[in-house]
Amino acid sequence: MHKVNVSVPAVATNVGPGYDVLGLALNLRNTIEMSLTSENDLAVTVAGEGVGTLPENYYNPVMTAAIHLFQQLEQAPAGLTVSCHNRIPLDVGLSARTTMIVGGLVGANNLVGSPFLRVDLIQMAAELSGRPEAVVAAMQGGLGICATGSERILHRTVEVAPLRVVIALPEVPSYEPRLRDDLPGEVALADAVHNIGHTALVIEALRTGDDDLLAQALQDRLHEPHRRSHIPAYDAVVAAAKNAGAVGVTLCGAGPAVIAFAAANHQLIETAIQGAFQEAKIEARTWAMGIDTQGVVISVVE
């Protein structure tokens, strides 16, 4: 039996104005164990986040991605066993499903002798997930930047200055704006220009550790104005986090998770955010964590 363990970091996409362009890898990980077996069976188990929601069959994102890679090679193992140990909450803006696709592709590729290069896996995962900005950061760590090219996605990874953030996840069962139908198909030229400039400055602020620049650059005009109104107490949470020492607060992806950037006082910021949500009778989970710089981590067991 050949076995591989793949660990993939969560990703906060957009990072303020970088809509569909930026992804920031976080030290919160899903781990996938994948084994080739001689039995003619595909087996999946899920532990942790997503239990009862993620399917334990072919339609699990890990298994679907693995089978896709085997199909590209026109070969398939007799049997495949997958165990998902998930710490990333599902469908809240932390790219959990994308990490599972990345893990499935990387694991399957390793099991068959790594015929695909990392750049190929990034392209494949981007096509399967539809979230290339999350794929780049999950695969390589740090701050991922991507754009659509004529044949392949264009992407680079930027090393960021040492940084810890606070992630807050409110319990908002009715939250649905993750669907893209809630966003306008056209935007004002001034708003587009605003986001182009602010995205470039967010990259520079994270690269250099310039908190003053980051505080001003996080402003977004394309998606947050349409989504934050669906999160009760959002403005109060932002104010509370900043009063406790946060440099800036923005949505993780489409939310409802939020990310607060801070140089210090992370525990105070967690408490302040939880208090602001509780004032609106909303429970929230919080984590303080660093930025991931490793991306995918693979360990092989023969």
Image (spheres, helix red, strand yellow):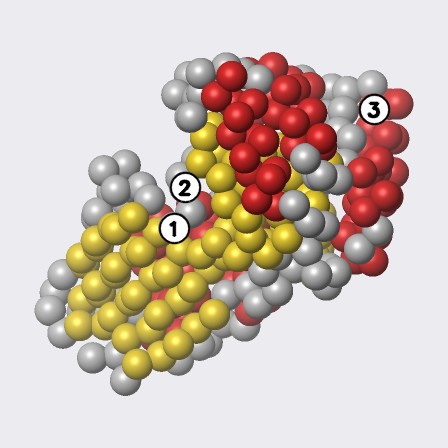
Q: Is mark 2 on a helix, strand or loop?
A: loop
Q: In this view, does 185 lie above or below 245?
A: above
Give left or right: position of 291 versus 95.
Answer: right
Mark 2 crowdedness (10 Å alpha carbons): few <14, some 14-19, many ≥20: some
Mark 3 crowdedness (10 Å alpha carbons): few <14, some 14-19, many ≥20: few
Q: Tell me if residue 125 can be seen.
A: no
Nearer the observer: mark 3 or 2; the answer is 2
Residue drawn at 61 percent across, 56 percent down:
291
Which corner quadrant of the image does residue 106 belong to?
A: bottom left
The residue identified by callout 3 is 191
User: Mark 2 or mark 3, which is nearer the start of the sequence?
Assistant: 2
The type of residue carrying mark 3 is Asp
The type of residue carrying mark 2 is Pro
| Label 1 close to label 2 by CB (< 8 Å) | no
Q: Which of 102 and 212 is in front in this view?
A: 212
Q: How far apart are marks 1 and 2 (CA)?
A: 6 Å
The residue identified by callout 1 is 87
The type of residue carrying mark 1 is Arg
Q: Report the disc number at residue 89.
A: 2
Residue drawn at 44 percent across, 16 percent down:
281
Image position, residue 223 (x, y; %): 67, 25
Give left or right: position of 28 versus 233.
Answer: left
Q: Is mark 1 on a helix, strand or loop?
A: loop
Image position, residue 177 (x, y; %): 53, 21
